[in-house]
Amino acid sequence: MKRQRQAKIIATLGPSSRTAAQIKALYHAGADVFRLNFSHGSHYDHLRSYQIIRQLELEVQSPIGILMDLQGPKLRIGTFVDDSAKLKTGNTFRLDMDDTPGTEER
């Protein structure tokens, strides 16, 4: 079944929506692409979802997109002297990995 719309509908799969029945229902409700969020869930969970989607693709004889959302690096801001720092337009600010409390310069 080829869909005629220009936009794609993306459905994010999670613990309550990764069963074969749920994935099939989401597809028939209009989902074109399934998003697997690798920030959550195990690799086995995502492998199983992938296999279910590919099986559904064979059943409906139409390509189904899979978006694998990979977790990027986690950057966290530490503490600041006096609990905050006010950055001024035009000034230089250095971002580093030092554990020393930050200032308006770093």
Image: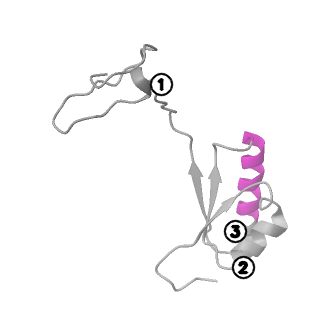
State the CA–CA distance, disc 2 to disc 3. 12 Å
Under circle 3, the secondary element is: helix
Indicate which disc, 2 or 3, sits on the residue closer to the N terminus.
Answer: 2
The quadrant in which the C terminus is found is: top left
Q: Residues within 10 Å of mark 1 (few under 14, many from 20)?
A: few
Residue underneath mark 1:
78
Q: Is residue 4 magenta?
A: no
89 to the left or right of 42: left
For the point 44% across and 27% down, the residue is: 83
Q: Which residues are magenta?
A: 42-55
Q: Which mark is residue 93?
A: none
Indicate which disc, 1 or 2, sits on the residue closer to the N terminus.
Answer: 2
Indicate the amino acid at tag 3.
Glu
Give the quarter of the image for residue 96. top left
Residue underneath mark 2:
28
Indicate which disc, 1 or 3, sits on the residue closer to the N terminus.
Answer: 3
Looking at this view, is 66 or 39 the one in front? 39
Q: Residues within 10 Å of mark 2 (few under 14, many from 20)?
A: few
Looking at the image, the residue that sits furthest to the front is 82
Question: Which is in the foreground here, disc 1 or disc 2?
Answer: 1
Indicate the amino acid at tag 2.
His
Indicate the amino acid at tag 1.
Gly
Residue underneath mark 3:
57
Give the quarter of the image for residue 97. top left
- From this view, report whether residue 31 is shown above or below residue 105: below
